[in-house]
Image (cartoon, rainbow, N blue to C red):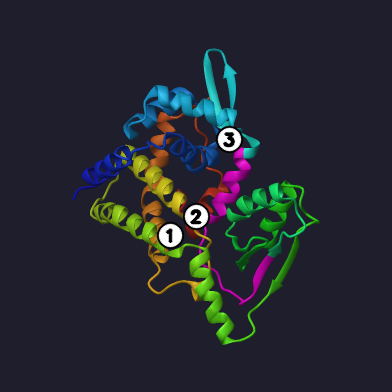
């Protein structure tokens, strides 16, 4: 299958879904492509660039309005043109997600668990914290206990601080006492984190994007518009799965975990198309001062390092 046909297949698949995720795709474009290149873009160029994804001008404007209302985006009006960028809150959320999306998802594990005890909190605050800590991989072991292995404490502390819950929850670290307890804990992990569903989603991701990578391997030059479409859909689909993945250590995962192969495929495919996609964005996206500026230096740290010109 040619690169053009495999990309068209991705676009058809995206457009065929019962709910066209225009708003989610727009956040992907801002976080992946616009934020590292100055952060602001004229809505007209966004409308042009998203037309190939089956997203109409009306849908772009509606989605951008909703994101602005929900404090994901903010607008700057200059003359008759509107320029949009991630809000402070939107930037914070995507910066948090960036560490997961573009970093190595599997780290070494000491065998210790981080536990957050919610017993002394009001019921409403418990619900908020369960949802918030779920974003960084925690799951409820019981109604009052959240757990995660190998948790980065700065991310946990920041989440608690945002919800004025720095003192009331009890945060503890511990480990299982013997091999039998460790086996029981692994069984509990598989039930609480719904790993079968996440593994199946990774498998579908691999099946969807492997033909694209195979076509790229046969292509000497990559069409810049196709590269932008591939890169956008790649991060859109990977992001949707990864942000549900608790990023458990390998010791706790089932055999043949598809997440490992999905990360490698996403990394290799991104490295292959990002430069051509940036060329497309330089020609198509407009800011207040003209074309997008070059990517910030930290952009090139993604996926273990990208080559600079």
Q: Nearer the viewer, residue 203 or 284?
A: 203
- Circle 3 residue: 72
Magenta-drawn stretch contains 187: no
Magenta-drawn stretch contains 100: yes
Residue 279 lies left or right of residue 216; in this view the side is: right
Image location of residue 168, percent across then percent down: 79, 56
Distance from disc 2 to disc 1, alpha carbons, whole Å, reads 7 Å
Marks 2/1 in contact by CB < 8 Å: the verdict is yes
Please tell me whether mark 1 or mark 3 is closer to you in this view.
1
- Circle 1 residue: 198
Residue drawn at 54 percent across, 39 percent down: 35
**Which residues lie in the magenta part?**
90-115
Distance from disc 1 to disc 3, alpha carbons, whole Å, reads 26 Å
Sooner in the amino-acid sequence: mark 3 or mark 2: 3
- Element type at marker 3? loop
Q: Nearer the viewer, residue 131 or 26?
A: 131
- Element type at marker 2? loop
Residue extending furthest toward the right: 167
Quadrant of the image occupied by residue 39:
top right
Image location of residue 102, percent across then percent down: 50, 54
- Circle 2 residue: 244
């Amino acid at each position: 299958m040619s690169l053009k046909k495999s990309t068209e297949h991705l676009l058809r698949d995206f457009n065929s879904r019962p709910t066209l995720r225009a708003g989610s795709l727009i956040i992907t474009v801002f976080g992946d492509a616009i934020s590292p290149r100055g952060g602001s873009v004229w809505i007209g160029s966004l409308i042009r660039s998203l037309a190939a994804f089956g997203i109409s001008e009306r849908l772009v404007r509606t989605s951008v309005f909703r994101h602005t209302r929900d404090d994901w985006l903010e607008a700057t009006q200059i003359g008759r043109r509107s320029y949009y960028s991630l809000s402070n809150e939107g930037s914070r959320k995507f910066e948090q997600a960036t560490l997961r999306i573009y970093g190595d998802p599997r780290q070494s594990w000491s065998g210790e668990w981080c536990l957050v005890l919610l017993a002394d909190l009001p019921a409403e605050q418990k619900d908020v914290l369960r949802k918030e800590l779920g974003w960084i991989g925690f799951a409820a072991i019981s109604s009052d206990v959240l757990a995660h292995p190998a948790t980065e404490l700065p991310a946990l502390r920041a989440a608690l601080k945002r919800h004025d819950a720095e003192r009331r929850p009890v945060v503890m670290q511990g480990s299982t006492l013997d091999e039998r307890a460790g086996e029981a804990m692994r069984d509990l992990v598989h039930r609480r984190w719904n790993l079968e569903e996440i593994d199946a989603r990774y498998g579908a991701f691999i099946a969807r994007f492997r033909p694209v990578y195979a076509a790229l391997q046969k292509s000497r030059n990559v069409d810049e518009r196709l590269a932008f479409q591939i890169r956008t859909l790649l991060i859109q689909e990977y992001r949707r799965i990864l942000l549900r993945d608790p990023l458990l250590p390998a010791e706790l995962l089932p055999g043949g975990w598809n997440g490992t192969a999905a990360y490698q495929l996403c990394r290799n495919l991104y490295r292959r198309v990002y430069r051509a996609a940036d060329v497309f964005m330089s020609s198509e996206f407009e800011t207040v001062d003209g074309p997008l500026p070059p990517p910030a230096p930290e952009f090139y740290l993604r996926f273990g390092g990208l080559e600079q010109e």
